[in-house]
Image: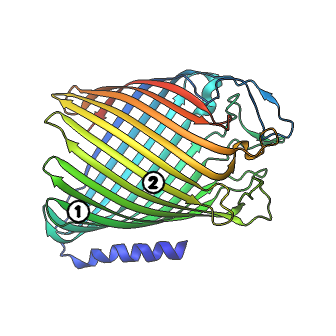
Amino acid sequence: MTTKLNTLLSCGMLALSTANTVQAQEVVYNHSASAAIGYNSNVYRTHDGTYTDWSDNATPIVNPDVQSGFFIPLKYNLEGIYALNNKTHLQGELNAKGKFYLGSDLTNANETKYKLDFGAVHTLAGKKRRVSTIHANLFIDSVDKTYYDRDTGLEKVAGVTDVADRYSYRGHGAQLLYKNRTDQTFKYGGGLAIGSRDYTDTIANSQMDYDYTILEADIDYQLQKATSLSAGIEREVQDYDERPSRNLAGSLFLSNPVLEYTYLTLSFGVRHRLNDNWLLYGDYQNIERDDSWVNYNGYTAHKFKLRAIHKRDNIRTKLSLSKLTRDYPNALAFDDPVNGVNVNKTYDTLSLSLSREIEQSKHRSLWGKVAYHSTDTNDLRYDYDRFQIFAGYKWKY
């Protein structure tokens, strides 16, 4: 991984030596913050109703406890830019966010994330609306959250071993992007990212650590004055050194080959300005996942998303609808036969949200949001629905 990082950064930073030096300037920065109070009708994403857990050899009857409560979501963003010379700028960005539940019995749903980027952007040619640029940056990120039992909200255990930190990780990587706008109507680009995630080790489970490589390309074409079309392709490979694949029976044995997921995503989008107040978006993604062995957890996914944004004076309203379907040709519900019969897993999600932001001044605004999410699957351990309501305040400087 170190060799890959060095090679990628060397290519990206080569651009720094190609421009003329100018007098040093001050760092230009801006930052924003958001704080809110929220209500979640289903904090632990719990199934609403009694079910039989076929993944357990004893096939117990489970009576889930759906829990609701209030939480505080916080966000902070800081961006800075420094002109190194007349074509090259150093850039840095910090994103941090967290959600913190107010009830003592809901704290296992607390979560914090941050990502720090630092790099440079260099103009290869052109200016204004006809320009090609290259971006190179390093990043580190972190996620801290609890692996909990969805039926109870309690920390997960494997036998007598606490595995609550299983999904917390620290990550790092590097990214190289190329962007080219040939004229006012057409632009294209491509990129390469490599990185790794180091998860908290839990002795009772196979390790979650993996390295990844992402290759991507995209185009954007302004079909008419009010309408733009976009398309993209992305290929990501996730290499798990210490996590075995599942066999076709859904079993995890240490003797199985190590897991390697390959994702191929095709994206298509349309953007249309209906009038001075309305802006409409439509997006579609086709995602193929393969595990490089017997493809037990491989799937084909289709994701549709529609957005409508209305802006008038100081009020911005956004309506969003998304639908995701996954087809698993090999995976079994509960990763085991159901009542002695192999039943292929089905998985669909539906998300709806309505938000409004009212600008009080150049730097401050009030905002609110109502959201609904539903996951419909025949693996009832992961079948749930929930409502969330937010009211908050934003600062931008």
The image quarter in which residue 343 lies: top right
Question: Label 2 amino acid?
Answer: Asn
Q: Residue at x 70, y 43 (%)?
A: 333
The image quarter in which residue 256 lies: bottom right
User: Which residue is label 1 attached to?
Assistant: 187
Disc nearest the viewer among 2 and 1? 2
Is residue 385 in view? yes
Instruction: Say which element carries label 2.
Output: strand
Residue 98 % position (x, y): 49, 37
Side (left or right) of 243 relative to 326: right
Residue 174 % position (x, y): 44, 65
User: Which residue is label 2 attached to?
Assistant: 286
Instruction: Say which element carries label 1.
Output: strand
Distance in Å between CA atoms under marks 2 and 1: 22 Å
Is residue 177 in view? no
On-image quarter of the C terminus: top left
Q: Is residue 274 above or below residue 270?
A: above
